[in-house]
Every structure is written in C-alpha cells, then in structure tokens.
Image (cartoon, rainbow, N blue to C red):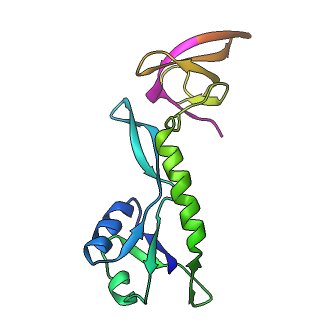
Amino acid sequence: MTWHVIHTKPRQENRALENLARQGFRCYLPTFKAERIRRGQIYIGIEPLFPRYLFICSDNGLNWNAIRSTKGVQALVSFGGEIAKVDDQLVDVLQNVENNLKTGEPDKLFNQGEKVQIITGPFSGMEAIYQMSDGESRALVLMEFLGKPTKAKFDIVHLKKSC
C-alpha cells in the first residue's frame, strides 16, 4: 500500500476529497479544530492540517488521468518527474495525531502573551499584548498609552496577530 500527495486548488480540499471518494479512491485529509472569526463572531471550525494537500492511497495502481481531472485537484505532487510517495507509517502517525487534536482543545485564535496589532479605529496600527478573552467577542489587551501600560478591551475582529 502506497500513499501519494495531491495538491488541491485553494480552499478546495474537501471538494477534491468528496469527488475522489465518489470515484472510489481511498483518500485522507488530516484536519484539526481551530478558532476562527467569521462575520464578526468567533467560531470553532475544522481546518486542514496541511492546507491545499491531501493523501491518496494506491493499493494496486491508480488512474492518474482521472485524478488530475477531478474537480478540486490541482496536480499530483512530484519531484523530478517522479510522483511523490509517502510511507504508510507516516499516514498512520498523522491519523493518531489528528485523533489527539480532535479530542483536545481547539487551536486558539490568540494565546496569552502574544503580540497583536489593532487594525481599525483610533488605535489602528498600534501593537498590544493579548491578555485574555473577555466574553465571546471581546479581548483584553495590554498596550502602551501615554508612556504607561494600559489595559484595554477591543472587539476580537479588530485584532490580528503581529508579525
């Protein structure tokens, strides 16, 4: 049993997975839970562990033309004209890691002590240090204002991770 890697079109991992499965291919898309912002609200969503990539198994050969023409698929990953192979033990490890990630806490949008940047309003462009969540849609940050460290509350949608 050999696994190969498929490069998908942007944000079409699930579409490629569904279409390949419909054709009878055995595929695997590792995912994890993560906090995200959508329409000004925090939600917990399922995200691909490797955006734009999924794995496909070849037990006794694959129809590469059918795979390439599947909706959502960009290409098969290859190196020097050779289609890349992934050891099945690596896929087993990824499945175990995925199971642990799904049972644990979701990946947080911001972590305590992390630098964030305010992106809108009168403080736009200023950096702050994320302290904690204050309800569902607000965050408590520590920022320097008039030469003093000051605690402030902002809507979570007005913050982004600082580089």
The x and y percentages for residue 82 are: 58, 89
Give 103 or 5, whichever is nearer the viewer. 103
Q: Which residue is depicted at the point 58% across and 60% down?
A: 93
Is 34 part of what is drawn in magenta?
A: no
Residue 135, image quadrant = top left
Give 66 or 151, whichever is nearer the viewer. 66
Does 10 appear above or below 149?
below
The x and y percentages for residue 123 are: 56, 21
Does 86 appear above or below 42?
below
**In the image, farthest residue toward the right:** 147
The x and y percentages for residue 16 are: 34, 68
Does 73 appear above or below 101?
below
Res 146 visible: no
User: Which quarter of the image is occupied by the C terminus?
Assistant: top right
Instruction: Report the side of 46 relative to 86 (left or right).
Output: left
Instruction: Report the side of 9 relative to 22 (left or right).
Output: right
Is 160 part of what is drawn in magenta?
A: yes
Give 110 or 95, whichever is nearer the viewer. 95
The x and y percentages for residue 98 are: 51, 52
Q: Which residue is depicted at the point 35% across and 67% down?
A: 17
Q: Which residue is depicted at the point 36% across and 30% down?
A: 40
**Magenta region: which residues?**
152-163
Residue 14, image quadrant = bottom left
Instruction: Report the side of 155 relative to 88 (left or right).
Output: left
Q: Which residue is depicted at the point 41% across and 62% down?
A: 10
